[in-house]
């Protein structure tokens, strides 16, 4: 498992470095792995949309931008590149993504495609701000756990409603949503917690 993770991490970081080198050699775009540079990613994608070219024609650029956005999460938010398992590959349509310190896995490659398809309501900078700082104190080992698919529209699982309660499902869509679910098992009551749309899956708080 560790060998596979490192392989994905090294491979994608190399892709990011090559993409930045190629882009900056042709332009003065500030792709410096800062959070602010994600606005540049949105700007580039918007330019591709306005060019009238279809997704297939600009697929290699979208891939590079997605890798770059993922690398910003790695460098600035403590994420790591991971190989998706079979179920996650089917869910996301990608072989790799990033895992955040809170244990959830995300699909930045897909987020860039969403920006291309849907426009301004999908923002890479907002994507970063929604994910950063989600680490859960008291669960130091969680980031090493494999993420499990959530329910309903592939949403992430929310916080347990009570002790042993079932987590709520996240709101459909690519943005991190707020989940809600009624506790079952040993505890009762209604709980809320961070959910996620089709770009993320993660372990419940009960793990």
Image (spheres, rainbow, N blue to C red):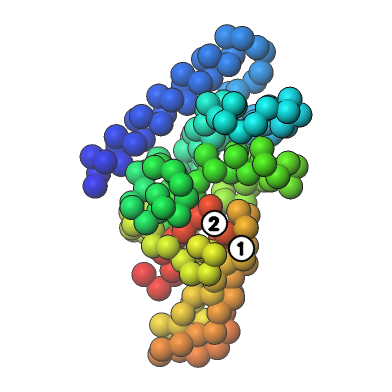
Q: Where is residue 65 in the image (x, y as percent from the top left)?
A: 56, 30
- Res. 42 image quadrant: top right
- Does dot 1 land on a helix, a strand or a loop? loop
The residue to which callout 2 is attached is 198
Residue 66 in the image, given as x and y percentages of width and height: 54, 35
**Image coordinates for residue 146, horizontal then vertical, percent:** 34, 57
Q: How many labels does the image show?
A: 2
Quadrant in the picture for the C terminus: bottom left
Q: Residues within 10 Å of mark 1 (few under 14, many from 20)?
A: some
Q: Are marks 1 and 2 in contact (CB under 8 Å)?
A: yes
Query: What residue do we see at 58% from left, 16% from top?
Result: 23
Label 1 or label 2, whichever comes before in sequence order? 1
Percent x, y of residue 122: 69, 45
Mark number displayed over residue 172 = 1
Residue at image location 65% in from the left, 12% down from the top? 27
Can residue 40 be seen here? no
């Amino acid at each position: 498992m560790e060998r596979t993770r490192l392989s994905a991490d090294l491979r994608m970081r190399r892709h990011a470095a090559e993409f930045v080198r190629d882009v900056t050699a042709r332009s003065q775009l500030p792709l410096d792995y800062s959070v602010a540079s994600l606005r540049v990613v949105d700007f580039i994608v918007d330019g591709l949309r306005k060019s009238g070219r279809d997704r297939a024609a600009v697929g290699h650029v979208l891939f590079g931008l997605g890798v770059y956005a993922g690398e910003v999460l790695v460098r600035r938010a403590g994420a790591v590149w991971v190989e998706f398992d079979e179920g996650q590959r089917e869910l996301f349509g990608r072989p790799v993504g990033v895992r955040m310190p809170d244990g959830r896995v995300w699909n930045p490659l897909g987020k860039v495609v969403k920006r291309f398809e849907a426009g301004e309501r999908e923002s890479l900078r907002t994507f970063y701000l929604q994910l950063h700082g989600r680490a859960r104190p008291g669960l130091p080992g969680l980031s090493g756990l494999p993420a499990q698919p959530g329910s309903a529209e592939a949403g992430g699982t929310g916080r347990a409603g009570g002790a042993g309660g079932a987590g709520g499902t996240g709101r459909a869509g690519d943005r991190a949503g707020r989940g809600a679910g009624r506790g079952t098992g040993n505890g009762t009551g209604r709980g809320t917690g961070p959910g996620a749309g089709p770009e993320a899956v993660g372990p419940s708080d009960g793990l």
